[in-house]
Amino acid sequence: MYGPEQVNVVQRPSPIFLEGTTPIRITEEVALQLGLKDGQTVRAVIENRGDLLRLVLNQREFDLKGNNRLKAGDKLEFKVSFGLNGVMLRPVNAQGTAITGANANSSSGIPTALLALLHRPKEAKVLLDLFKPNNLKEMSAPIGAREWIQKLDKMKNSMERLSAGDVRKSVQNSGLFGESSLLKGAPNSSDLKQILRGLLLNLPDNSKIFKAVEQAITEVEGRQIDSLNSQSSRELSLQFVIPFNDAHAVDVEIMKENHTEGSEQAHWVVNLHTESPELGDIWLKSKLLGNDNLEMTMWAPRSEVVESATLMKTELEYELNKFSLNLDSFSILNAKRPIETKNLNNLGEVIDIST
């Protein structure tokens, strides 16, 4: 279990500095300005600026402190490592190996377990399957585990009578804030991750349910890391599941997008995904434009679901108007939602950016 000191690895941007051969920590914003990529080896030069020695990297100056062995004209190489707590420039020794601190567990200074969570394959379906109707009741579990299964079952809401308070409670119990509650001295007995861990301790290691619960815990912890990582780029991202006792669970992602070029303000985005035997997979993306305008896109592989949604568009507009919301556009696509991918930079690239 990760404590607050391990989970909260995202820190506020710190001043750029260099002390001897210790790594330089910079923000991702500065790294992008310098044109740096993860895995690169970059070369900087020591220059005399106003009787002071400075490390100059792509016309950006870094202070030199406590290192009397360096002189003007010396060149140093650094390995670039992107991580949750910023970007590290680690000095490279004569053998081409990055010099790391004694406490670093990986090349980026982040525990390997956290890196595994950050780069894990997304497993939203694990949580959706866990809360399928009657799935918890049908689980064959030892007596000691039944108490925890009952706690999971009590987390379910009614789709027919869902309220704003129910959604708020689902966010609070999502497992995203368990460590924060413990740190404040107010543990949440309904926290999803804590309940799953209690259940895991009472299950046989080689059972099918053990693996499913273990995967669910990994997904919750991964979402914690994703939320914290989004803060480093001054965005917001919360992903959680709303379970129901009269319908299939819905996976929810709430995002606040940063200002983009040509946009006067940030936009709130809500992504929904659910799956059921009757309707198949359904994805819905809602973007709040300004204070009262909505832009919505729906994806459904089944053509009959698309036809039904098209017929319900007028009713949807009517329901949104009750909350003073206007539906600017509603696109309904007969397809699976495309998987968003990030461009990955080539690793091991070496560049010379000395001035």
Image (cartoon, rainbow, N blue to C red):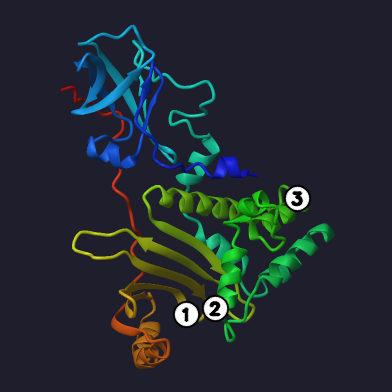
Mark 3 or mark 2, earlier in chain? 2
Query: Pointers 1 and 2 in contact (CB under 8 A)?
Result: no
Query: Dot 1: within a 10 Å radius of its alpha carbon, few (fewer than 14), some, or many (20 or more) residues?
Result: some
Helix, strand or loop status at disc 1: loop
Query: Residue at 57% of width from left, 82% of height from top?
Result: 162
Horizontal placement of 112 versus 320: left or right? right
Give the number of the disc on residue 164: 2
Helix, strand or loop status at disc 3: loop
Residue 222 vs 299, above or below: the answer is above
Give the number of the disc on residue 344: none
Residue 338 vs 182, above or below: the answer is below
Query: Pointers 3 and 1 in contact (CB under 8 A)?
Result: no
As measured in the structure, the alpha-carbon distance from the residue carrying label 3 to the one carrying label 1 is 35 Å
Residue on which the image places disc 1: 279
Give the number of the disc on residue 201: 3
Residue 310 vs 82, above or below: the answer is below
Residue 2 vs 53, above or below: the answer is below
In this rendering, which labeled residue sits more in front, label 3 or label 2? 2
As measured in the structure, the alpha-carbon distance from the residue carrying label 3 to the one carrying label 2 is 33 Å
Amino acid beneath label 2: Ala
